[in-house]
């Protein structure tokens, strides 16, 4: 059973589930009990009914953990992201609808074995960094109920922070996936725009929106990213991932630090000390800290709400707000209707200004591999925000608003606690597609600064050896090396890590080869091929070399194209060996062939 004090981090929970010591049904029961025990904390807007959750758990138990990297892992979904058959409200009751389809990013998580527990509260229409602009109430800080949880992804952060779920999805346009992480002792990953599909997400600023990940550790965030980052051709804003040249270890990494005169902590001396402590710790860990000019980034941050991008918020819900303006929270209504004012000329002028600021920031990126900044300069009580909602919200966006405008990747990392016991964090920033390297850097820094996860008091688990983001090799396997099959140990003994289960591009055929014990297939790239199920594993270069050395002819390693367009190393077969072999491509994969009893 899942005890009330058990940790839900992916490392601990995942190990128990894969070993059979815990069943998905135990997880469902335990999570529902934790929700009941917390009472009405304003974090949840909709919890999936027990019957449906139990049916999902039973479905997973019948299938088993093989090939499901998130098997039985519970997660939450910000309520501007669709879960098919369940309500989406965007924290606006009159806007609510029952989603007909599940958002692409959520479906990827479900396909990996995760269990969607429910939908979480937010600043209405994801407009705000404070977490109080919801007619359903304001989820407060778990550390002090007088303080804000941060927004707009308020409920998502709280349910992870409180140990209710293992991770949660938020969204991030101006900092909504980072500010709540800073205020809740969590990791908040804001991926590169377009890396995670936004199809099935109610837009805020569609050209800037991205789905974010709240997790207890950076390693957990990376594991979720590995599953969720699939190119979605149905999302016009989706982008194919390209390698970034960002170091994945702090030793030797050049970290840009804003000039002290360019930093603002709004009188919060504790926040300033925590930031200075994080910078000092970076140097102790072997990073090279370099002073940079932060002025272009700060200027870009001001463009987001002082410029015409707020027009995108108006466009996103124009028909609804024009018809029912009274249905919106007063502050949300004020901000959104302001988006009807900018002209096309204003939009172009702002775009030109942004391009100039991106060019002005180039010297900082030439001097540094990554940049560190406060996630927020301070925090506020709920009462303070209610009394001065616009100005204080703007203060919270100083270090977050520019990130999507400038096409950066970012991850918020816990940095420690103020004298009053409130958590605050720092953010590591890098160019687009440095997401996985940032996760590795964040994990190293997190462990050096804070020893606990969220508000749970659980210590951070032992560091997981992840292959270096630059030097690791991803390998697609299609046969006896799949999870649970006879040769899988050749990967796990070498410390390989399962990244995801997916399919190839529709250009391959699979044949049952003769003369192998255990039975093995051969995959060949052919015109008129099909999508073949594979697992992608990650190994160090050394482990990859020893693994390849033992591969028997006619099998070999070549380049395999996956269904999302990404290319990885993978098993391929010399065509001569398939002559006369049984073509099993129509089954879609080797596991399906074995289940038919043909591989005995």
Image (tube, rainbow, N blue to C red):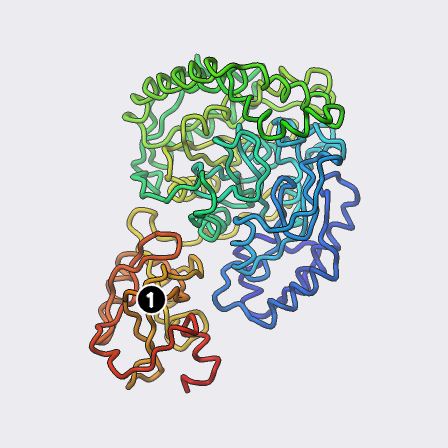
Nearer the observer, 142 or 232? 232
At a point 39% along the width and 23% down the height, the residue shown is: 257
Residue 365 in the image, given as x and y percentages of width and height:
31, 26
Residue 151 in the image, given as x and y percentages of width and height:
62, 31
- State whether residue 86 is above or below residue 94: below
Left/right of residue 20 with respect to residue 364 in the rendered view: right
Residue 508's quadrant in the figure? bottom left
Nearer the observer, 490 or 565? 565
- State whether residue 297 is above or below residue 53: above
Is residue 7 visible in the rendered image? The answer is no
Residue 379 in the image, given as x and y percentages of width and height:
62, 24
Residue 545's quadrant in the figure? bottom left
Image quarter where the N terminus lies is bottom right
At a point 70% along the width and 55% down the height, the residue shown is: 31
Is residue 513 visible in the rendered image? The answer is yes
Left/right of residue 407 with respect to residue 327 in the rendered view: left
At a point 27% along the width and 56% down the height, the residue shown is: 541
Nearer the observer, 338 or 500? 338
Q: Disc 1 designates what residue?
A: 529
């Amino acid at each position: 059973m899942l005890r009330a004090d058990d940790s839900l981090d992916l490392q601990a929970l995942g190990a128990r589930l894969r070993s059979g010591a815990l069943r998905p049904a135990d997880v469902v029961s335990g999570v529902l009990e934790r929700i009941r025990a917390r009472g009405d904390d304003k974090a949840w807007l909709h919890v999936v009914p027990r019957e449906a959750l139990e049916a999902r758990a039973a479905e997973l138990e019948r299938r088993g953990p093989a090939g499901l990297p998130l098997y039985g892992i519970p997660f939450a979904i910000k309520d501007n992201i669709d879960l098919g058959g369940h309500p989406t409200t965007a924290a606006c009751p009159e806007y609510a609808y029952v989603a007909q389809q599940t958002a692409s990013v959520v479906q990827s998580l479900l396909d990996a074995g995760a269990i969607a527990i429910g939908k979480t509260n937010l600043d209405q229409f994801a407009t705000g960094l404070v977490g109080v602009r919801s007619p359903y109430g304001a989820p407060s800080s778990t550390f002090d109920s007088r303080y804000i949880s941060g927004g707009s992804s308020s409920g998502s952060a709280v349910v992870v922070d409180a140990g209710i779920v293992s991770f949660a999805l938020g969204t991030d346009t101006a900092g909504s996936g980072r500010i709540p992480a800073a205020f809740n002792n969590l990791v908040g990953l804001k991926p590169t725009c377009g890396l995670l599909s936004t199809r099935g997400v109610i837009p805020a600023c569609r050209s800037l929106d991205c789905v974010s990940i709240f997790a207890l550790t950076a390693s957990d965030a990376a594991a979720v990213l590995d599953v969720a980052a699939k190119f979605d051709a149905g999302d016009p804003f989706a982008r194919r991932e390209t390698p970034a040249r960002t170091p994945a270890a702090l030793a030797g990494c050049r970290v840009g630090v804003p000039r002290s005169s360019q930093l603002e902590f709004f009188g919060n001396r504790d926040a300033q000390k925590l930031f200075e402590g994080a910078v000092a710790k970076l140097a102790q860990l072997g990073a090279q800290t370099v002073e940079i000019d932060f002025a272009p980034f700060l200027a870009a941050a001001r463009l987001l709400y002082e410029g015409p991008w707020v027009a995108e918020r108006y466009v996103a819900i124009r028909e609804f707000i024009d018809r029912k303006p009274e249905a919106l929270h007063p502050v949300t209504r004020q901000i959104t209707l302001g988006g009807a004012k900018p002209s096309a000329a204003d939009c172009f002028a702002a775009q030109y200004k942004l391009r100039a600021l991106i060019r002005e920031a180039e010297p900082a990126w030439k001097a540094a591999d990554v940049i560190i900044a406060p996630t927020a300069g301070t925090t506020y009580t709920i009462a303070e925000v209610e009394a001065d909602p616009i100005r204080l919200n703007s203060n919270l966006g100083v270090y977050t608003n520019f990130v999507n405008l400038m096409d950066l990747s970012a991850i918020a990392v816990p940095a420690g606690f103020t004298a009053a016991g409130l958590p605050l964090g720092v953010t590591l920033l890098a160019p687009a597609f440095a997401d996985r390297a940032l996760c590795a850097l964040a994990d190293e820094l997190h462990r050096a600064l804070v020893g606990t996860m969220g508000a749970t008091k659980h210590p951070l688990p032992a560091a997981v050896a992840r292959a270096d983001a630059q030097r690791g090799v991803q390998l697609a396997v299609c046969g006896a090396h799949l999870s649970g099959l006879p040769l899988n140990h050749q990967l796990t003994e070498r410390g390989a890590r399962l990244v995801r289960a997916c399919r190839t591009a529709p250009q391959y055929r699979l044949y049952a080869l003769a003369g192998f014990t255990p039975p093995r297939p051969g995959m060949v790239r052919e015109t008129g091929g099909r999508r073949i199920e594979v697992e992608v594993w990650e190994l160090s270069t050394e482990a990859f070399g020893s693994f390849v050395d033992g591969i028997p002819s006619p099998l070999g390693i070549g380049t395999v194209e996956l269904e999302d367009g990404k290319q990885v190393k993978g098993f391929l077969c010399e065509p001569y060996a398939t002559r006369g072999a049984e073509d099993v491509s129509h089954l879609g994969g080797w596991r399906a062939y074995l289940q038919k009893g043909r591989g005995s």
